[in-house]
Image: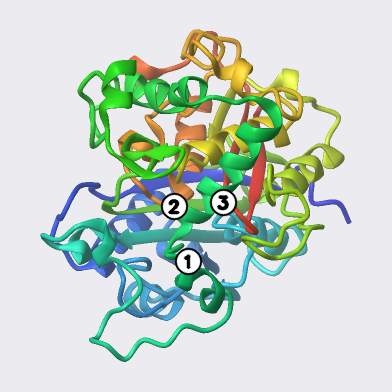
Amino acid sequence: MELRRRAAVTGIGQSAVGRRLGRDPLDLTLDACVAAIEDAGLSRDDIDGLSTYPGAMGPGGFSGAGISDVHDALRLPLRWFNGGPEHPGQLASVIEACMAVACGLAHHVLCFRSVWESSHQGAGGRQGLGLGEGGGGYRATGMMEYTLPFRAYSAANWIAMFAQRHFHLYGTTREQLAWIALNARRNAGLNPLAIYRDPMSLDDYFAARMISTPLCLFDCDVPVDGATAVIVSRADRATDLRRAPLHIESVGCALKGRPSWDQFDDLSTMATRDAGAALWEGTELRPADVDVAELYDGFSFITLSWLESLGFCGKGEGGPFIEGGERIALEGELPLNTHGGQLSAGRLHGYGFLHEACVQLWGEGGERQVAGGPRVAVAAAGGGPLASCLLLTRD
């Protein structure tokens, strides 16, 4: 049975989002979850499914809560639940919720994602996150055995490798890539909840320190504390709720290349290529029908990769497509990352893009609202060997 239009987003919620909030991450998670339930006009007794990525994990601020935490705190009568790190990107937990309601395992699934990277970072730099915690006992395994000797410590280095290859093959420039960050900052200036709202010029961008060539500071997302939640409902259970449902028209989560950061078959692209192509296999809609694009920008090159992978421009044409920022502006042909993305609004790790897509389709964007009543939106998350995307429509 096809997934198409058997699932709908019926409510969204978000906690406070900020730098070093110092709040318990489960507290933030529950704020978002309760807000989403209320937004849909449901009660906790109506929620019979729960889904998240990556689930409960250890220190690092990468996960604020797991399935068991939220299940127990809200006392939910679950018929189905799902959580774990081995997924095709952050939004795969939402895609799995769509599958669950489509085949009758649940009626209303609460999907959530929370982070507290900023508070975990403390007063130190971002290098304080991730590897090396707990003293000198760290021993590299897997791909890290091969990357660490070359000081390729993090995704900043790995994504920079993809960007360099794209620059080499297609003539893409830093002047072009800068417009992902500049557009995000311009939109964030209209979003009262964004972390960085001060105007940024091209000169400001080039004055920032390099992180991993060709990516500078403003090509990297902003660690924050915060949580986001959405309700995915069966389409036949979504017709009489508080909001008009946003139908899941199609999803993409394919991976046909190697599941590897550094051994992918084409290092000028990534898993976005396969997930983006799969999205259009499930619908008659085409890229030209999309009114709003909310595309992952953990690093700015990932957004460029999504633009090409989703067919908004040809392969290798991402640089000219975004150059100057006119096409991707709020008033342009493809409004992009309308809330400021993770580069300026804060790193909510994928879920923030789905939240913003819903805000735009429901016409609640305030000063940043795209004109003309957008009816079709795409939300995409992930990079490297992980990628997933959803196409949403408002009837």
Q: Name the residue under label 1.
A: 150
Q: Quadrant of residue 286?
A: top right
Of badges 1 and 3, the one in the foreground is 1
104 lies left or right of 227: right
Label 2 vs 3, first from the N-terminus: 2
| Element marked by disc 1 | helix
Q: Name the residue under label 3.
A: 382
The residue shown at (53%, 75%) is 78
Question: What percent of the width, then of the height, locates residue 181?
Answer: 40, 28
- Can residue 160 be seen here? The reply is yes
The residue shown at (70%, 33%) is 169
- Quarter of the image where the C terminus is located: top right
| Element marked by disc 2 | helix
Identify the amino acid type marked 1: Phe
- Residue nearer the viewer, 70 or 238: 70
Of badges 2 and 3, the one in the foreground is 2
- Quarter of the image where the N terminus is located: bottom right
User: Few, some or many C-alpha atoms within 10 Å of disc 3 (few <14, some 14-19, many ≥20)?
Assistant: many
Label 1 vs 2, first from the N-terminus: 1
Residue 156 numbered mark, or none = 2
Question: What percent of the width, then of the height, locates residue 376?
Answer: 65, 25
The residue shown at (27%, 32%) is 208
Of badges 1 and 2, the one in the foreground is 1
Question: What percent of the width, then of the height, locates residue 83?
Answer: 54, 73
- Residue nearer the viewer, 209 or 352: 209
Q: Residue furthest front?
A: 150
- Residue nearer the viewer, 378 or 184: 184
* As drawn, 7 above or below 50: above
Q: Are marks 2 and 3 in contact (CB under 8 Å)?
A: no
| Element marked by disc 3 | loop
